[in-house]
Image (cartoon, rainbow, N blue to C red):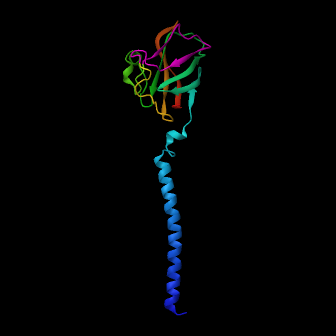
Amino acid sequence: MNNNNRRFVKAQSAMEYLMTYGWAILIIAVVLGALFSLGVFSSSNLLGTACIAYSGFECTNPLLHNGVFTATIGQSTGTSWTSTNLIFIGSGGGTPTEASFNAFGTNSITCPPDTVSGGLSTGSSTTFTTYNYLTGATTCSGMPTTLGQAEAGTIWAQYNTASGSGLISQVATINIKAT
């Protein structure tokens, strides 16, 4: 075999090697592109549903269905609350003021506060719902309604006690997916 033939065989072998691995890499790239476009690698898909209560509070059974968020909220602060309002503020909505509880459209999720009838005594709980009572709408503007869509935010309480009024406390942090 002369040198030209050897070079041809080596070049053919190199081309076959590149083509085989090239097709494999192309197939992997197409599959990764399809998975990425389906949202498999989205950070919101990595988060599960969680309702993390702060010290002295309870947050259980979070559910986001058809744009309505519900959770069981309780408090064990040692002081009974009267005139209790609960509000959900979407991520980036900031810290509410007393005016936020009266003008509900100022945060990223426009839901009015959920008024707890009779207040919330220490050691008790209530079901908190973000239903838009003012407009009668079944969803609050900004709440996800698409299956699997995620939302994050915080639940805040405005309440009165025997020693003060208009008090505001952060109750829980929420990460939830629509079901």
Q: Kindly identify the residue that appears in the image at 58 percent across and 17 percent down.
A: 74
With respect to residue 91, does 87 lie above or below?
above
In the image, the segment drawn in magenta is 112-136
Task: Where is residue 27? Give x, y as percent.
Answer: 51, 60
Residue 125 magenta-drawn?
Answer: yes
With respect to residue 154, does 21 lie above or below?
below
Task: Where is residue 71? Give x, y as percent.
Answer: 55, 22
Task: Where is residue 16? Give x, y as percent.
Answer: 52, 75
Q: Kindly identify the residue that appears in the image at 55 percent across and 11 percent down.
A: 120
Identify the main secondary structure in magenta: loop
Which is more toward the observer, 71 or 103?
71
Which is more toward the observer, 176 or 37?
37
Q: Residue furthest right?
A: 123
Task: Where is residue 100? Give x, y as percent.
Answer: 40, 19
With respect to residue 162, does 70 lie above or below?
below
Which is more toward the observer, 152 or 100?
152
Residue 166 magenta-drawn?
Answer: no
